[in-house]
Amino acid sequence: MLIRKLFPPKESVFTVDTNGNGKVDSLQIKFLNLIMPFVIPKEIEIGDFSLKDIDSNSFDISQYAKFFLDDMQLDFTKESFNLDNVANRLLMYHKGESYNISDILEGKLSGKTINLGDSISILIKIEKDTLNRFTEGKHIFRIESDFITNLEIIFELDKTNMNVKFDPNNA
């Protein structure tokens, strides 16, 4: 139930146009902090996993988790999902400021306070064939892992959150 509050079904996932050409090119996933203010720690660790230990040449996220959209497993093997490619396709936004993977790994978010009511958005540039899977209606994004608690985000796409212009100040 908490996940549904942090990721409201109709307000947490958007297909967006980031460059204003009228064509959707990215997926925006928005987290809303409804629990309590918190400060981003100097080192981000999830269980025994630390971001500082990532070697982009050998990292294989599929060893740590499986990802699903609805009932289809997404291919995040090392061969198809390389960190250098992700670094060029992923941005995080908070209060109009953007952070790329290098910024996050270098600790540029360290000490930043996420206040009650703040949102954090992850913007992921994805290919058209993948974007086509994000159709109008209800969907489930699921992460299964032995390292962290499994996560399931239920979201719904409709005219209000599909094919919208990305606004970094409202991310």
Image: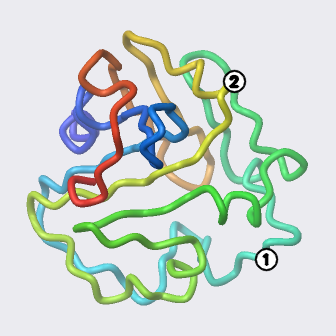
In this picture, residue 120 sits left or right of residue 36:
right
Q: Is residue 1 above or below residue 149?
A: above
Q: Is residue 139 above or below residue 60?
A: above
- Residue hosting label 1: 55
Q: Position of residue 62 (x, y in %)?
A: 76, 48
Image quadrant containing the N terminus:
top left
CA neighbours of label 1 inside 10 A, class few (<14), some (14 to 19), many (20+): few
- Mark 1 → mark 2, Cα distance in angstroms: 29 Å
Q: Which mark is residue 112?
A: none
Query: What is the number of callouts on the image?
Result: 2
x 57%, y 25%: residue: 69
Q: Is residue 161 above or below residue 39?
A: above
Q: Tell which circle, 1 or 2, labels the residue nearer the N-terminal end.
A: 1
Disc 1 element: loop
- Residue hosting label 2: 129
CA neighbours of label 2 inside 10 A, class few (<14), some (14 to 19), many (20+): few
Q: Position of residue 89 (x, y in %)?
A: 62, 56
What's the residue type where badge 2 is placed? Asp
Q: Position of residue 4 (x, y in %)?
A: 24, 33
In this picture, residue 35 sits left or right of residue 43:
left
x 32%, y 72%: residue: 97
What's the residue type where badge 1 is placed? Asp
The part of the image, by quadrant, that contains residue 71 is: top right
Q: Is residue 72 above or below residue 83?
A: above
Residue at the top extreme of this rendering: 137
x 34%, y 39%: residue: 165
x 24%, y 23%: residue: 160
Q: Position of residue 43 (x, y in %)?
A: 48, 85
